Image (spheres, helix red, strand yellow):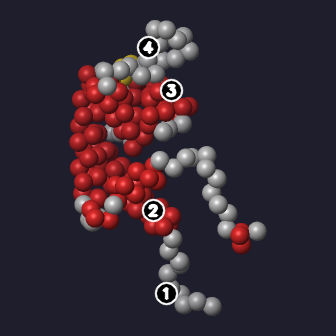
Amino acid sequence: MSDAGESPPVSPGFLLWHATLRWQRLIAAALRPLELTHVQFVLLAVLWWFTEVRGERPTQRALADQAGTDRMMTSQVLRALEGRGLLERPQHPTDSRARELRLTPAGADLAVRAIEVVEGVDRAFFSTVPEEGGLEQTLQALAALEPERPVPRNVTDG
């Protein structure tokens, strides 16, 4: 029997889980005064990038694909943002099944403010990590993993 004060074995996934939870809590707290959830922020920020940086008017599908979000959930969140007057979702001019997305001036303004807030949280959160450790490269490699790739089973898992 092990000591009650002993810690459970630590794995990279467990550490990533805890770091992610801590980062998500900080982001949520920073976005609360702007009345945005983390998912709302991501969709608004990616839409801002599409429209302001790339000069495009994406469809909901393109936005969900770029953001890495579920399409149905994306549609629901966009309806909520539309209800707040932050974006418009008119019918796509050439595809009757699609919606084209446009930020309103209020949406573009909020996106810029929220991006600044989140970038500030990121700078503070990740500033404690030594640069020579290759954190950015590691995160890029993890983000690039194929979601469909099967996870190897441990031989002892039965």
| Residue 5's disc number | 1
Residue kind at label 1, given as amino acid type = Gly
**Going from the N terminus, do you reach mark 2 or mark 4 first?**
2
The residue sitting at 34% across, 50% down in the picture is 27
**Going from the N terminus, do you reach mark 1 or mark 3 first?**
1
**Going from the N terminus, do you reach mark 3 or mark 4 first?**
3
In the picture of the structure, the residue carrying the numbered disc 3 is 61
In the picture of the structure, the residue carrying the numbered disc 2 is 16
Rendering coords of residue 135 (x, y %): 34, 59
Quadrant in which the C terminus appears = bottom right
Picture quadrant where residue 44 is located: top left
The residue sitting at 58% across, 89% down in the picture is 2
Observer-nearest of 31 and 142: 142
**Going from the N terminus, do you reach mark 3 or mark 2 first?**
2
Quadrant in which the N terminus appears = bottom right
Q: Distance between the residues labelled 1 and 4?
A: 59 Å
Q: Distance between the residues labelled 2 and 4?
A: 40 Å
Q: Do the residues labelled 1 and 4 touch (CB within 8 Å)?
A: no
Residue kind at label 2, given as amino acid type = Leu
**Going from the N terminus, do you reach mark 1 or mark 4 first?**
1
The residue sitting at 28% across, 64% down in the picture is 132
Picture quadrant where residue 78 is located: top left
The residue sitting at 46% across, 53% down in the picture is 142
- Which one is in front in this view, the residue at disc 1 or the one at disc 3? 3
In the picture of the structure, the residue carrying the numbered disc 4 is 90
Query: What is the total number of numbered labels drawn onto the structure image?
Result: 4
